[in-house]
Image (cartoon, helix red, strand yellow):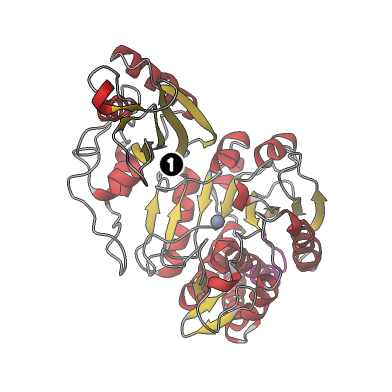
Amino acid sequence: MTSGQDAEVRGFDAALSSIDAYFSSGDFVADLARRVAIPTESPKPQRRPELRFYLEQELRPTLESMGFTCRLFENPDPAGGPFLIARRHEADELPTVLSYGHGDVVSGYDDQWADGLDPWILTQVGDRLYGRGTADNKAQHTINLAALRAVLDARGALGFNVTLLFETSEECGSPGLGQFCEANAELLAADVFIASDGPRIQRDVPTIFMGSRGAFNFSMTVDLREGGHHSGNWGGLLSNPGVILANAIASMIDEHGEILVEGWKAEPMSDSVRTAVSALQVGGAAGDPDIDPHWGEPGFSPAERVIGTNTFEVLAFETGNPRNPVNAIPPRAVAHGHVRFVVGTRAADLMPALRRHLDRLGYDDVVLESAGVSMEATRLDPTSPWAAWAIESVTNAVKREVAVLPNLGGSLPNDVFAEVLGLPTIWVPHSYAGCSQHAPNEHVLLTICRDALSIMTHLWWDLGNGDTPHSKLTRQ
Ligand SMILES: [Zn+2]
């Protein structure tokens, strides 16, 4: 071993023991408790000062002590709270990582938590740390920042450049995030995006996901006339909007959940994506519903169905008055539909495809309306250079199997990073499905946090060791 390699090994051991001490000394819990105590509820307009406080008074001093230059930005969208960009630049030739977190949380629902729990007081019960925003997203970015500091202290430098972006309106659908990133694309330029949010696929299985399915919501309305008409006098003479809409829906998806609209089916997965997805285990944890073996797109395993195909759901359907049915032909029916889709399908193409489908079948009475917010699908192939690098680093860190999701089944505003900023996106989630995110009794698990501190220390260490897809590119 050369003395350089020797120093590298000693440095790495020092980083690992310092992150271990951070956890076992109680410093991690103390940092998280302070952050949870700031009620950054973005759905409540009166919490704007707390959103700013979180960035300015909580994150900024932490980051400045690590050599970051911090700047607060107003949100270009008045519906959203401020942004923080923090940069630590070491050298132009080093790789630059963009990381991200959100300081806001959903509403506390203070009176709905279990006895002895308060959303704003971090409380340990067994392996659980309860508090609003623990899982989503405060423990996640607290872990990533602490791991950065451990590497910085042990190596004396990171060995890479970092840009951190914090937003404060994620729980309101990230208003202004896309616009902000577009306007500041130069400031946010990087080689790779690495961040943490969301759950692991199973609590004990370290997980990497690299994109998400897109989401699109819309309504279908059949509105035929003013008021209802007595079925004894008019039944058989007046068409029933509920029946028309039910038939229209039945033409879109069959009784086994297979999509029938042309242009709504997913593009086939590449071999490497399908191989990664087919290795995944979905559901099966305590409290999970039983998976219906014959639902969804035929010919796919459960993991392939939720991660690799497009799905359509009827979220709500109403005609007449379900709380007080009367013997009349209702005048109107409305259904709210929802599509999750993978790369290859674009949100903007879904409604025109549905319109063509309905018109072809004579359902021209069905009026379609988009429900506003939609998210595009993103995905990174597991064999692409940065994905392969991250998978190897996390696998080396945990020395056990790692779940690799080319994209999540759920949706995130990842298109901002993947498409607006054009980055390969790597997410390493530190929560788990049972965390009660967005509900009362939100919590993280101490065992996962400890594991995650070590994983992120490995990942940041490897990013600075000079052997990344970036260094291979610059050496060519
Ligand atoms: Zn959330």
Closest to the observer, 444 or 81: 81
Work out whether 210 lies above or below 416: below
- Confirm whether the magenta stretch covers residue 392: no
**Residues rendered magenta in the picture:** 150-160
The amino acid sitting under disc 1 is Arg
In this rendered view, identify the residue nearer to me: 247 or 385.
Answer: 247
Q: Which residue is at 48% across, 54% downward?
A: 390
Q: Residue at x 46, y 67 (%)?
A: 435
Can residue 30 be seen from the camera position used here? yes
- Percent of width and height locating residue 396: 43, 65
Q: Quadrant of ligand 1?
A: bottom right
Q: Is residue 408 left or right of residue 467?
A: left
User: What residue is at 68 percent from the left and 71 percent from the top?
Assistant: 35
Q: Quadrant of residue 136?
A: bottom right
In the displayed structure, 85 sits above or below 221; it is below
The quarter of the picture where the C terminus appears is top right
User: How many residues crowd mark 1 within 10 Å: few (<14), some (14–19), many (20+)?
Assistant: many
Give the SS element for disc 1. Answer: loop
* Total numbered labels: 1
Residue nearest the viewer, comparing 125 with 95: 125
> x and y percent of residue 174 in the render?
63, 45
Residue 78 sits in which quadrant?
Answer: top right
Residue 337, position as x, y percentages in the image = 40, 35
Q: Residue at x 69, y 62 (%)?
A: 40
| 159 to the left or right of 356 | right
- Indicate yes or no whether the magenta region holds residue 159: yes
Q: Is residue 141 left or right of residue 238?
A: right
Q: Which residue is mark 1?
A: 213
